[in-house]
Image (tube, helix red, strand yellow):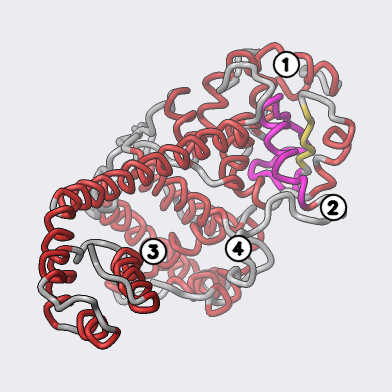
Amino acid sequence: MSVEISQLPDKVKDWLYARAESKKTLRAYTFFWLKFKEFCSSRGLNPDNIVDEYREAKYQDMRTYERFLDKWQDVIRAYYMWLKRQDYTPGTVLKFLAALRSFLKFWDIPLKVILPKHYYVVYHNRDLKKDELRQILNFANPRDRVIFLVLAESGMRISTLVNLKYWQIKEDFEAERIPMMIKLPSSSLKDHVGDRFTFIGEDGYRELKSYLETRMPLKDDDYVFISERKGKVKSEQFTPESISTKFNRLVQKLGIAKSRGKGKPKAIRLHSLRKYFRNNMRTDSAYVRFWMGHSLRADENYISRDIEEHRRRYAEGYKFLRIYEPSPETIYGLSQKLKEKDEKIQQLEKQIRELQERFEEVRDLYDTLQKFPQAINEIVTRAKEIPKPLSNEIIDKLIESSEFDKITDEIFRRFEDKIIEKIKEMLEKAKSENKRLP
């Protein structure tokens, strides 16, 4: 059901762009609308024209108007029952209906979409434990490690972090001020709230600084996090989905969470890092909601907006949030040490294999050397059978004889060439000096 937004009718596009606050919501609302259209098609109707159809009925007589309302109200009731039979979770059914109600309300169409009063979450994302998060950070690559850590320490959504610009961290980052403030403009937040800010602690700041070292100095509008595969990203910036996919693969590889099956939500997913922040940051819940970009409702009028008060509260709660024990080393540095140890172990294993191979060679050489005196005696015995004194002609024949080659090939087949050459050299010397063999 892949349809470009540009292919949708104007009335649907106007609603989408007015109500969807993020690209993710835009995609979700598009999907919800196409599902409603799929159901209507099975009833011989096309919801793309519902706005024009409603206005035409409204400006005719009352009977036409009532007939329009009855027809579409029946469709909406049936749509709800159809969704329930599609094996969607109660929460997902609620989202489908809420999107439809948003569309009707936007165009002032007086059709009722009754949302379920009581719905429950079937597949909860379980809490992510600190030791599991440490394991994930230890095995993630350098860039993803910083992303995961910043998400866990700030409570940001991945869509906000991916589009983070340098100006949003510049003030505290360059001042090396910890906890480090991250500015969150209203346009970067999903909820309908004003400008906010959040923080990261000592570990997050240290790892972020290590990550950015090779790219400094940055301009204000430069992305804090960039693609690892230059030229492979089609858009200006990599997508939140790409990071989510890498996180899911790593979790599966480490055996932290098993798949629930096709089409079922994962027990641990990237959003679990935001949940980790919510569950482990110990301070007034209004401040936690503020940093996470949630609506404050009544607390909006009472919560302090003083940055230093927020910084103080974050610092107090950070000891409960912190993933690693305080250490002068970065997580990257620790992971590098682990990598170096692994390399040393691999080198030692290689040396052991080489020593084993060398030992086999030495043992074979030793066995051959045991036969060496006997071989020399054999050569000497045969040499003594040659008339004395030896002539150069006889020595040449001895060097070139097949008997000599046969004996040396058999006795010294595992020797290096230099040993055989040494024997030949002795014979050559005898030839040049015209000496007798012993």
Residue 36: which disc? Answer: 3
> Real-space Cα distance between discs 1 and 2?
27 Å
**Residue 23 placement: quadrant:** bottom right
Q: Amino acid at mark 2?
A: Leu
The x and y percentages for residue 229 are 59, 64
**Residue 192 placement: quadrant:** top right
Q: What quarter of the picture does the C terminus occupy?
A: bottom left
**Residue at x-position 26% and y-position 83%:** 391
Q: Nearer the viewer, residue 347 or 317?
A: 347
Q: Amino acid at mark 4?
A: Trp
Q: Amino acid at mark 1?
A: Ala
Q: Which residue is mark 4?
A: 15
Magenta-tinted stretch: 186-214
Q: Which residue is mark 2?
A: 218
Q: Amino acid at mark 3?
A: Phe
**Residue at x-position 65% and y-position 41%:** 191
**Residue at x-position 76% and y-position 33%:** 197
Q: Residue furthest bottom?
A: 393
